[in-house]
Image (cartoon, grey):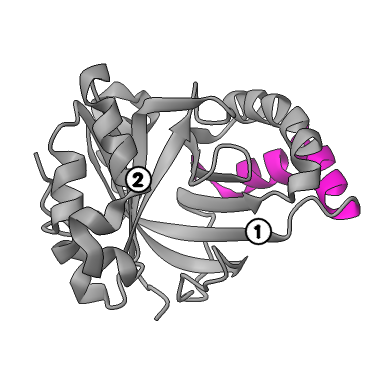
């Protein structure tokens, strides 16, 4: 069942703990089989730097919670998989978001139940997924460094990260935007991204893709390390409901 409320949690580990997280990504069912088989939790690896790299960063991971029922969201943070991932971390960032609009699928699944609400007047989040055709891997990754630089320099992008389940064949991005004009300028008008989109469509790079916009419910964790997020999290521009428990 598509989710109407979603969490994306980003964890950083000391190097001595990095391989444990890597093994959990490869064998999540060994730790928490029932939850993982239901598709509620997806453990994804981050690339080096901001995440937009074919070289993995074994010290950073994303755990995406997609519950079948909204009331199950808090319970995900009490599962064995979540606690085993969160426990050894030295940095955590948690985003609770509500799907507003979008299209596409992830591993053949429709993950989100979109509310249809308009976003853009207040800060909002964007999640994208690009699953790359094996024959187009080289063409795709040639574009990524320039797109990453454009995103890092984009006015109005408060934070972003790249991650996925395969370092060559999948790249997901999650970004926080000040407003709709800023996001559209990056996506459709300025820098390398519009050119990359045109090539991807014209040359059939992506057999599967996803684009989704989200209302931001809460930002928690070590936000003080990221000035843009810290300012937003302490403002009245996002809903900030009662916080979910954060594992330690």
In this view, 3 is above or below 240: below
Quarter of the N terminus within the rendering: bottom left
Q: Determine the CA span between mark 1 and mark 2.
A: 21 Å
In this image, 112 relative to 64: left or right? right
Quarter of the C terminus within the rendering: top left
Q: Position of residue 199 (x, y in %)?
A: 87, 45
- The quarter of the picture where residue 40 lies is bottom left
Residue sticking out furthest to the top: 15
Q: Which residue is mark 1?
A: 209
Q: Position of residue 205 (x, y in %)?
A: 79, 50
- Whether the magenta-drawn stretch holds residue 171 is answered as no
Mark 2 packing: few (<14 Cα in 10 Å), some, or many (20+)? many
In this view, 61 is above or below 101: above
Under tag 1, what secondary structure? strand
Residue located 55% across and 35% down the image? 156
Res 25 label: 2
In this image, 170 relative to 238: left or right? right
Q: Which secondary structure is most common in the magenta stretch?
A: helix
Nearest to the eye among marks 1 and 2: give it.
2
Residue sticking out furthest to the bottom: 1
Q: Which sits in the foreground, 190 or 204?
A: 204
Q: Which residues are magenta?
A: 176-202
Mark 1 packing: few (<14 Cα in 10 Å), some, or many (20+)? many
For marks 1 and 2, the one nearer the N-term is 2
């Amino acid at each position: 069942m598509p989710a109407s409320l979603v969490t994306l949690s980003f964890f950083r580990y000391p190097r001595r703990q990095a391989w444990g997280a890597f093994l959990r990504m490869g064998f999540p069912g060994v730790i928490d089989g029932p939850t993982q088989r239901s598709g509620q939790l997806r453990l994804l690896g981050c690339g080096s730097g901001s995440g937009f790299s074919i070289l993995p960063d074994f010290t950073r991971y994303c755990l995406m919670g997609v519950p079948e029922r909204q009331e199950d969201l808090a319970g995900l943070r009490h599962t064995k998989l979540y606690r085993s991932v969160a426990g050894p971390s030295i940095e955590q960032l948690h985003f609770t978001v509500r799907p507003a609009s979008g299209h596409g699928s992830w591993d053949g699944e429709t993950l989100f139940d979109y509310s249809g609400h308009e976003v853009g007047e207040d800060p909002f989040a964007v999640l994208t997924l690009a699953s790359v055709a094996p024959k187009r891997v080289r063409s795709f990754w040639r574009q990524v460094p320039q797109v990453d630089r454009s995103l890092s320099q984009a006015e109005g992008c408060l934070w972003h990260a790249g991650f996925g389940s395969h370092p060559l064949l999948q790249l997901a991005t999650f970004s926080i935007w000040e407003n709709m004009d800023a996001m559209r300028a990056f996506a459709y008008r300025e820098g390398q991204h519009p050119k990359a989109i045109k090539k991807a469509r014209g040359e059939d790079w992506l057999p599967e893709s996803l684009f989704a916009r989200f209302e931001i419910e809460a930002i928690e964790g070590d936000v003080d390390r990221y000035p843009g997020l810290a300012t937003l999290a302490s403002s009245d521009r996002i809903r900030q409901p009662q916080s979910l428990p954060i594992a330690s």
